[in-house]
Amino acid sequence: MERSVNSANRVLIIANLHKTNAGAMALEVERFFRCQGWEASTFSFEGNPRSGVGYEGYRLIVSLGGDGTLLYVARQAAALGIPVLPINLGTLGFIAANKTNSWRSAFEAWLEGELLPSARIMLDIQAERNQEILGRFVALNDGVVSSQGISKMIRLCLNVNDDCFGFYRVDVAIDETRRSGAMLTVDGQETLTLQQGDVVRFKRSEKDAMLVVPPENMFFQALRTKLGWSGDGHA
């Protein structure tokens, strides 16, 4: 039996249909929230979800997929301060750590105020050429500058708060489909080709991503528990 809908309780479910059973799981999640008295909407996608959907007006976003789906969702939700409940339908799930049999308890604990969302730092990344902006990106995971040349090395100038820390020749990950220059990759999804002299600036975003994940479900915390790590470097 469905409860009466509270207009303040709106949830948006983002489902990556490339994941096994994502469509069926989206229906299950939507039914659950409707039974809890929430207004639930679902946006499903296959491939590139760039057209997307507006996040405004929702109290909670549910990410149905793997870490890649969560990275896509978190970038938009963080800007609006909306928490994300990730449900892992992928393989390992480093950050999309709620499983299909545990997400309900995570949601209920968050709703009752017993579980505070985990704040994850977001990065603002800006690429410039000749003092003109090539692109702006927001990342939850990382921004990587990788070589495209045969030498498989690039020369980086590291600046912090406009102070030069020096120049470095570094080995980096290679994209063998390219022949020259370098590439900026954001969260493993968005890419931008760079040239010599281009500048890439990284800074912490004003808003963090807020993930509804119990500490014991987080990958590295679970790994520490299984291995008996004490936190001081000793088992």
Image: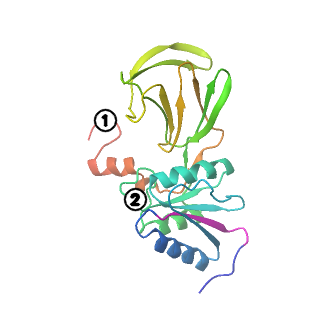
- Taking the view exactly as shown, the residue that stands out farthest to the bottom is 1
Relative to residue 164, is residue 136 depicted above or below?
below
Q: What is the span of residues highlighted in magenta in the rendered image?
A: 7-17
The local secondary structure at tag 1 comes to: loop
**What residue would you read off at disc 2?**
90
Tell me the element at label 2. Answer: loop
As drawn, the label of residue 202 is none
Residue under numbered circle 1? 233
Q: Identify residue type, mark 2.
A: Gly
Q: Amino acid at mark 1?
A: Gly
Q: Position of residue 111 (x, y in %)?
A: 59, 65
Residue drawn 57% across and 22% down?
198
Q: Main secondary structure of the magenta part?
A: strand
Q: Is residue 24 above or below residue 78?
A: below
Vertical side of 42 occupied by 218: above or below: above
Location of residue 224 in the rendering, given as x and y in whole percent from the top left corner: 33, 47
* x 52%, y 14%: residue: 165
Sequence order check: which comes first, mark 1 or mark 2? 2
